[in-house]
Image: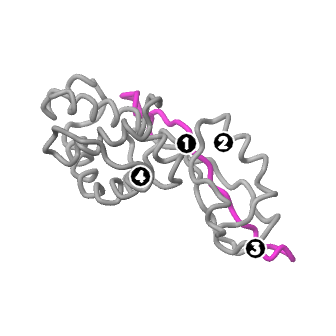
C-alpha cells in the first residue's frame, strides 16, 4: 500500500525535522514515484495558548515534484505535529484536558472554565459536538486495537475517553498518540 509509506503526523518538531531529511527516500502516497518529494511550506496557525494573534508552526507541507523528467504527480500533502488537531485552533492536549475533566464528573461549562483557555465557550461546545459526530469512526479504530473496557458511563463520549485511556495508558495525551498510531486526524 502506498499510503502507508507516508506519515501524516510527527511527534514533535524534532521528529518532523528528522522525517523531512528522509523525504527523497520515500514514495509519494498519491502516485508512488520515488525521489520526487520536496519540502513545500511550513504550516502555521494560531497559538492556542496566547490571547494575542501569535502564530506557531503546526506542521509542514510536502510536494511531489512533477518538473523535468522526475515523473511525480505535482500533488502536495501535510505532515502535522501530533498535538495539532487539523482545521482547529484547539490542540489535542487542551481537548484531552477538557475530556478528562468531563470524565471526572464536571459539567461542560465548569470544565471549560477551569481550563482557562483563550477561546470562546461556544467554540469549545462546537468542538465537543463535532467530536460526538466522529465517535463511530474513533471507536471503530480503537476497537481494532483493543476491545472497549467495561464502563459505568452512559455517555458514549465518556466511554470513548475511557477506551482511549485503556488503549494508550502511558501516554500523557492519548489524542495525539491516536493520530500518530492510526495516521489520521482525530476529528476526521
- Is disc 3 placed on a helix, strand or loop? loop
Viewer-side residue, 115 vs 39? 115
Residue 86 vs residue 49, the one in the foreground:
86
What numbered label is drawn on residue 24?
A: none
The earlier-in-sequence mark between 1 and 4 is 1
What percent of the width, then of the height, locates residue 131?
28, 50
Question: Which image quadrant is residue 138 in?
Answer: bottom left
Q: State the separation of the CA atoms marked 1 and 2.
A: 7 Å
CA gap between label 3 and label 1 equals 25 Å
Sort mark 1 into few (<14), some (14-19) or many (20+) by Cα contacts within 10 Å.
many
Rendered image: mark on residue 16? 2
What whole-number distance in Å separates the C-alpha atoms at marks 3 and 4? 27 Å
Mark sitting earlier along the chain (4/2): 2
Query: Which circle's residue, 3 or 2, is located before the other in the chain?
Result: 2
* Mark 3 or mark 1: whose residue is earlier in sequence: 3
Q: Is residue 44 magenta?
A: no
Residue placed most toward the observer, 81 or 168: 168
Callout 3: few (<14), some (14-19), or many (20+) C-alpha neighbours within 10 Å?
many
- Mark 1 touches mark 2? (CB < 8 Å): yes
Between marks 3 and 2, how big is the CA–CA gap? 22 Å
**In the rendered view, does 147 fall on the left or right side of 128?**
right
The mark lying in front, picked from 1 and 4, is 1
- Residue range corresponding to the magenta coloring: 46-71
In the rendered structure, find residue 72 and report the number of the disc placed on it.
3
Residue holding disc 1: 81
Q: Measure how far apart labels 4 and 2 are at the Cα level.
A: 19 Å
Q: Residues within 10 Å of mark 4 (few under 14, many from 20)?
A: few
Residue at 48% across, 48% down: 179
Give me the residue at 63% from left, 64% from top: 76
Q: Which residue is mark 4?
A: 87
For residue 114, above or below residue 59: above
Amino acid at each position: 500500500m502506498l499510503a502507508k509509506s507516508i506519515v501524516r503526523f510527527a511527534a514533535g518538531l524534532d521528529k518532523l525535522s528528522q522525517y523531512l531529511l528522509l523525504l527523497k527516500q520515500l514514495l509519494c502516497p498519491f502516485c508512488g514515484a520515488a525521489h520526487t518529494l520536496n519540502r513545500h511550506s511550513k504550516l502555521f496557525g494560531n497559538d492556542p495558548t496566547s490571547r494575542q494573534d501569535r502564530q506557531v508552526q503546526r506542521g509542514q507541507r510536502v510536494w511531489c515534484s512533477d518538473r523535468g523528467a522526475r515523473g511525480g504527480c505535482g500533488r502536495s500533502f501535510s505532515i502535522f505535529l501530533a498535538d495539532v488537531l487539523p482545521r482547529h485552533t484547539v490542540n489535542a492536549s487542551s481537548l484531552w484536558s477538557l475530556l478528562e475533566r468531563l470524565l471526572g464528573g464536571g459539567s461542560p461549562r465548569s470544565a471549560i472554565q477551569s481550563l482557562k483557555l483563550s477561546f470562546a465557550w461556544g467554540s469549545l461546545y462546537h468542538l465537543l459536538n463535532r467530536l460526538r459526530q466522529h465517535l463511530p469512526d474513533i471507536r471503530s479504530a480503537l476497537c481494532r486495537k483493543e476491545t472497549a473496557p467495561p464502563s459505568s458511563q452512559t455517555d458514549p463520549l465518556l466511554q470513548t475517553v475511557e477506551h482511549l485511556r485503556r488503549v494508550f495508558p502511558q501516554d500523557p495525551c492519548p489524542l495525539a498518540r491516536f493520530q500518530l498510531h492510526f495516521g489520521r486526524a482525530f476529528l476526521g
